[in-house]
């Protein structure tokens, strides 16, 4: 699929989800304003960094937006949507493949590209061939990701799975995803694809670790990227993007209509039935073990 087709699909997706006016404003900014800002930022800040493209692969509802927003506090960096990426949520397809020219697209720009790219041989080969020596993979316990996805989808009528999520109770939705094979094919399959692709050029960041000790995890990320940053700066970034600062709620206080819903780990223990938990352990024990999640 051409990048032009993906741009049109993405515009249509934004118009449906956020309104035509906002989509037009975002398109205007992307075409006319951002290139000027990108050039200025690169000229001013690029000498500070050993890397200009921070690429993050993450499954949906795994904390990658929070993580990317914190990285976006680096002077000169900002988040982008690559031209060749389609909208999120196309079932059975990789919405964010690493296409030819992916890395070159961001020459002389300081950007963060966050997507749900699968850990396929083609994607890893493309990253290697295009010379991206360092990238980040973020994960979350797939059971918690499924619960979070349910509440997220229920608020978005444009989502391809809205009909199921909006017509089912949570446990019923979980049953449907488990019995249909979608949980294994999508949530577990994404993790399984990356489990044997993690190498010295790839840093694994678990959502659970980021929740428990965000300052330590962010310091580890900056060290991996070769970015010099003070402990005070890391603390300021973490504080600015803390759950309470962003939402006005205490950590763990739930709002099912908010994109930042609850920010907890191991919610599955109080949601999944014993039978559902056993089923997940049976079909996903390799992935749960590989990423350090409890069976």
Image (cartoon, rainbow, N blue to C red):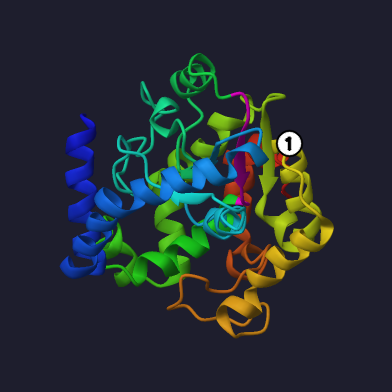
Q: Does residue 109 appear to the left or right of 54 in the view shown?
A: left
User: In the figure, residue 246 lies in which quadrant?
Assistant: bottom right
Evaluate whether residue 111 shows in this view: no
Q: Does residue 267 appear to the left or right of 5 in the view shown?
A: right
Residue 219 in the image: x percent, y percent? 78, 50
Evaluate whether residue 45 shows in this view: yes
Residue drawn where x is 63% and y is 29% of the image: 134
Q: Please say whether residue 135 is one of the residues in the magenta stretch.
A: yes
In this rendering, the answer to whether 168 lies above or below 113 is below
Residue bearing the label numbered 1: 226
Q: Does residue 41 appear to the left or right of 17 in the view shown?
A: right
Query: Which region of the structure is painted magenta?
Result: 133-141
Q: Please say whether residue 110 is one of the residues in the magenta stretch.
A: no
User: In the figure, residue 250 lies in which quadrant?
Assistant: bottom right
Residue 277 in the image: x percent, y percent? 62, 55
Residue drawn where x is 26% and y is 68% of the image: 18
Judge by depth and name the residue closer to the eye, 21 or 230.
230
């Amino acid at each position: 699929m051409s990048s032009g087709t993906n741009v049109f699909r993405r515009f249509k997706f934004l118009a449906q989800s956020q309104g035509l006016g906002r989509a037009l404003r975002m398109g205007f900014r992307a075409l006319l304003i951002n290139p000027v800002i990108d050039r200025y930022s690169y000229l001013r800040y690029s000498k500070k960094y050993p890397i200009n493209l921070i690429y993050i692969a993450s499954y949906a509802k795994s904390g990658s937006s929070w993580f990317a927003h914190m990285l976006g506090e680096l002077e000169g960096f900002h988040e982008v949507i690559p031209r060749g990426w389609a909208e999120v949520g196309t079932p059975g397809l990789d919405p964010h493949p690493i296409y030819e020219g992916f890395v070159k697209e961001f020459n002389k720009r300081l950007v963060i590209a966050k997507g749900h790219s699968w850990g396929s041989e083609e994607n890893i080969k493309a990253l290697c061939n295009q010379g991206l020596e360092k990238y980040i993979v973020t994960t979350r316990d797939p059971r918690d990701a499924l619960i979070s996805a349910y509440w997220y989808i229920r608020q978005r009528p444009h989502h391809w799975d809205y009909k199921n999520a909006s017509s089912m109770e949570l446990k019923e939705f979980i049953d449907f995803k488990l019995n249909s094979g979608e949980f294994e094919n999508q949530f577990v399959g994404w993790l399984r694809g990356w489990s044997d692709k993690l190498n010295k050029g790839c840093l694994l960041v678990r959502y659970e670790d980021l929740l428990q000790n965000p300052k330590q995890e962010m310091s580890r990320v900056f060290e991996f990227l070769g970015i010099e940053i003070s402990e005070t700066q890391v603390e300021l970034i973490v504080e600015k993007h803390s759950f309470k600062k962003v939402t006005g709620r205490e950590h763990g206080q739930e709002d099912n209509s908010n994109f930042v819903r609850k920010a907890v780990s191991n919610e599955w223990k109080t949601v999944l039935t014993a039978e559902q938990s056993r089923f997940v352990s049976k079909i996903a024990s390799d992935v749960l073990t590989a990423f350090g999640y409890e069976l």
